[in-house]
Amino acid sequence: MKKSIPLIALCALCSCQSKNQQQPPRTAEFPVVEVTQKTVTGYDEFPVTIKGINNNDVRAKIQGYIRKVYVDEGQPVSAGTPLFQLETNILNQNADAALAAVTASEAGIEAADAAVKAAEVEVRKLTPLVEKNIIGGVQLETAKANLARAQAAYAQAVAAKSQASSTLKGIRENINFSMVKSPIKGIVGAMPFREGSLVGPSDPTPLTTVSETSAVYAYFSMNEKEYLDFLERTPGASVKEKLKNIPPVELVLANGQTYPEKGNVKAVTGQIDAATGSIQFRVTFSNSTGLLSNGNSGKIRIPKTYENAIIFPEMSVFERQGSYYVYTVAKDTAYMTRVNITDRTDNLVVAAGGVKPGDLVVTQGTANLRDKTPVKPQKQDLDQLLNTLKPVF
């Protein structure tokens, strides 16, 4: 005999199945913001190399061993500050020898001068005797020849002294060159040579470099297309005017921090480099705090303004096969929408098409969405959202 299911239990089972069939799946909530229109500032960024406004390689003018080092790397110095002392033992000996030659040449001049005077006396004595026919003219001619030889010897003695004096002067100048001094006011750079090193004027590596860094130059390059685009959007009738109209630029240091003082574009090379296809710019930054050094690197940021731009949060954008998309929401349904991006700045996207002011775009969870997915939008305030994205240090 078959057992029958109790009537009450059967009714309960049917009631539960009926309730499950009547409850629709729960629609997921997604945060959205409204696409808006406002004026924003974007930036063109270029890597830069920083150099002091004046960098002087310090080299030895004579060859010798470094006897003493007076400064250290990174030390500020004034123009004329002693940096290195080279040994001068051989130079001192040469100077003594040259001085002795000068003394000897002076003695030679005195002797030659005395000989000239004696010859002149002899000529003056014989001249009236010849005129009175007391003696023949041969003796007078001989006396005149002796005078000429004495005068030539005197001239040679004077020339010898001049040469000896010049040699002594050159040796003394070389002795002065043994004290290597800073050519400018600035900061001492790397010092690859220390006491005991043999150095000379033909060395490929300088003793050190002194850099004037009260202000610095930041050099960056644009390729030809970037340069032409830059000129097109910068107001001015000539390159000179356009340079004057470039707003102050920012410098982002290697650690990601923005340098507190802004710089100005002061110069640009006049032609495209055929080897690199680029053109170089120079920006001047004040460096009163000494934070910037010769050889630093970073990025330059040139501001550019977008008037009444269509914007929405950058976090809304995702990429598919080289194109950019967002999920727009209309009538509680998410639609995958392709957008054209002009720029990205401060966590915002500047759009050139695909969305319009007033559209709602999903800000988070786009990986869980598909085209035409039903959603429950939770509207967010754009400014409040951007504030939460700002880094806190």
Image (cartoon, rainbow, N blue to C red):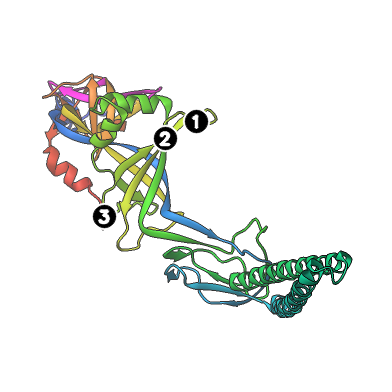
Quarter assignment of residue 128: bottom right
Q: CA distance from mark 3 to mark 2?
A: 27 Å
Q: How many numbered markers are drawn?
A: 3
The amino acid marked with disc number 3 is Pro
Tag 1: Cα neighbours inside 10 Å, few (<14), some, or many (≥20)? few
Tell me if label 2 and label 1 are in contact, CB under 8 Å.
Answer: yes
Q: Is residue 28 magenta?
A: no
Q: CA distance from mark 3 to mark 1?
A: 32 Å
Quarter assignment of residue 307: top left
Give the mark nearest the N terminus, 3 or 2.
Answer: 3
Camera sees residue 32: no
Horizontal side, residue 372 vs residue 73: left or right: left
Q: Secondary structure at mark 1?
A: loop
| Residue linked to disc 3 | 260
Camera sees residue 118: yes
Vertical side of 169 occupied by 234: above or below: above
Horizontal side, residue 304 vs residue 187: left or right: left
| Residue linked to disc 1 | 273
Give the extent of the magenta segment. Answer: 320-337
Q: Nearer the viewer, residue 137 or 112?
A: 137
Quadrant showing the C terminus: bottom left
Q: Secondary structure at mark 3?
A: loop
| Residue linked to disc 2 | 269
Quarter assignment of residue 355: top left
Vertical side of 257 occupied by 330: above or below: above
| Dominant secondary structure of the residues highlighted in magenta in the image | strand
- Location of residue 231 in the rendering, given as x and y in whole percent from the top left corner: 31, 26
The amino acid marked with disc number 1 is Asp
Tell me if label 3 and label 1 are in contact, CB under 8 Å.
Answer: no
Tag 2: Cα neighbours inside 10 Å, few (<14), some, or many (≥20)? few
**Residue at coordinates 12% horizontally, 24% vertically from top-left?**
357
- Location of residue 66 in the rendering, given as x and y in whole percent from the top left corner: 64, 74
